[in-house]
Amino acid sequence: MAKMTLAQIKERAAMQFNMDAEDVAELDPNLTDYVNEGYINAVQQVWRPWREETLMAADQAIPFTAFASKPIELLTVDAFGQPATLDELNACVRVLGAKDGDPVTVRYRYLVRALEENEDEPKLPDWTHGALADWATWSLYTNGNPQKQNRGLYYRQRYDDVMKRLRPFGETLLTERKFRNLYIER
């Protein structure tokens, strides 16, 4: 599957909801919210992206503004054995005992930016982009009568099936499964 933009994802969701691609404007901004809901869910709950950066400490801290993205969880911190904590209140990573100018290597989880412009592309692997349209379609159906809600379950299942194949921290998709019987794994 090729990369999809926010506009393409919304068009696909509208068509799956039995509307024309031209009707996307009629469904916005709800449709954008639904796509982002599925996107943020996939990123934060399943894919869980991280970065590693080496930054200089100042006043025993590294401000969030120094990072490429806002940290939400520290995975590892190499600060010459010094303890480090995520200080949300002061918007920094505290590195107790670090001197000004000490290099500190931080591996951290971060939040991705929501899709806002029609040209925005999800940061997820290309093969997952269609699942975001499935989530949005399911969300559109949940607003209807019980019959429509049941119709939408198909799209929720498709989304879940794709997310089961997505590996944490952007690891590659395992394309070959091992054969397993009761006694031997091959």
Image (cartoon, grey):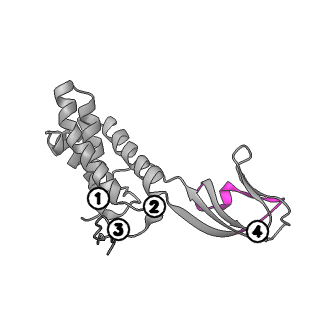
Residue 101 in view here: yes
Q: Position of residue 158 (x, y in %)?
A: 24, 49
Q: Residues within 10 Å of mark 2 (few under 14, many from 20)?
A: some
The answer for how far apart the CA atoms under marks 4 and 3 are is 33 Å
Helix, strand or loop for disc 3: loop
Disc 2 target residue: 168
In the drawing, does residue 46 fall left or right of residue 102? Answer: left
In the drawing, does residue 42 fall left or right of residue 15? Answer: right
The answer for how far apart the CA atoms under marks 2 and 1 are is 21 Å
Tell me which label, 1 or 3, sits earlier in the chain: 1
Which residues make up the magenta segment? 55-70
Check if mark 2's residue and mark 1's residue have beta carbons within 8 Å. no
* Kind of residue indicated by mark 4: Ala
Which of the two discs, 4 and 3, sits closer to the camera?
3
Disc 4 target residue: 79
Tell me which label, 4 or 3, sits earlier in the chain: 4
Residue 7 in view here: no
* Kind of residue indicated by mark 2: Pro
* Kind of residue indicated by mark 1: Met
Residue visible at 43% across and 48% down in the picture: 40
Helix, strand or loop for disc 1: loop
Disc 1 target residue: 4
Quarter in which the C terminus is drawn: bottom left
